[in-house]
Image (cartoon, rainbow, N blue to C red):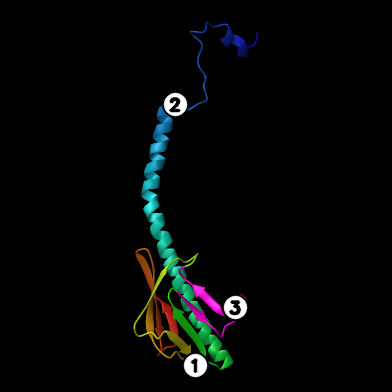
Amino acid sequence: MSRDLDYLREPPAIRRHVAGAFTLTEIVAVLTIISVAAAIAAPRYSGAVSRYRSRLAAQRLAADLDWARAHARATSSEVAIDFAGTGYTIEALAALDDDGVYRVDLAQPPYRVAVKHSVTLPQRLTFNAYGVPNGSGIILIQSGQHGHTVVIDATSNVARVE
């Protein structure tokens, strides 16, 4: 007979048990390790998402302000940005919406941030034909405990993220 069938000749009490399953102890140990790793990683992930959202929203606002300034200079016309609540509109720039007004609401996905304007920043920021804003100020973009600021400087005509 072949060697593979030798185990059948041994009595059942002596047969070796060849199993391919994990023991309960091994499964519990692995689940414990996974849960400890998840408990450590979850708060860090949440903080990283918060930082990412506030940074992304601040960069979007700064880019749109630079776009409005460049458009004002390129067309030699005035471009106004109206800040209202958690968003802003730029009427001179065409949008893909039906009404043709460029609108951004930073409280909506993917940003989901809170927006706070400084007292010195006008509610309607206007870039003249030379790209110079009618005022300076700070806009605070905050998501959770993390925040970034967009600084609008009338002397350098630049919007920067800090």
Q: Secondary structure under badge 2?
A: loop
Q: Residue at x 44, y 26 (%)?
A: 23
Pointer 1 residue: 128
Q: Give the percent coordinates (x, y) of residue 72.
A: 54, 89
Q: Is residue 70 left or right of residue 136?
A: right
What's the residue type where badge 1 is placed? Asn
Magenta span of residues: 87-107
Structural distance between the alpha carbons of marks 2 and 1 = 74 Å
| Mark number displayed over residue 20 | none
What predominant SS class does the magenta segment belong to? Answer: loop
Q: Residue at x 43, y 91 (%)?
A: 134
Q: Residues within 10 Å of mark 3 (few under 14, many from 20)?
A: few
Structural distance between the alpha carbons of marks 3 and 2 = 61 Å
| Mark number displayed over residue 95 | 3
User: Which quadrant would residue 123 be assigned to in this image?
Assistant: bottom left
> Where's the N terminus, which quadrant?
top right
| Mark number displayed over residue 23 | 2
Of the image marks 3 and 2, the number of the one nearer the N terminus: 2
Farthest-out residue, right:
1
Q: Is residue 3 left or right of residue 158?
A: right
- Relative to 9, is 36 above or below? below
What's the residue type where badge 2 is placed? Thr
Of the image marks 2 and 1, the number of the one nearer the N terminus: 2
Q: Is residue 45 left or right of residue 76?
A: left
Whether residue 160 appears in magenta in the rendering, the answer is no
Whether residue 90 appears in magenta in the rendering, the answer is yes
Structural distance between the alpha carbons of marks 3 and 1 = 21 Å
Q: Do the residues under discs 2 and 1 have CB atoms within 8 angstroms?
A: no
Mark 3 vs mark 2: give the one in front. 3
Q: Residues within 10 Å of mark 2 (few under 14, many from 20)?
A: few
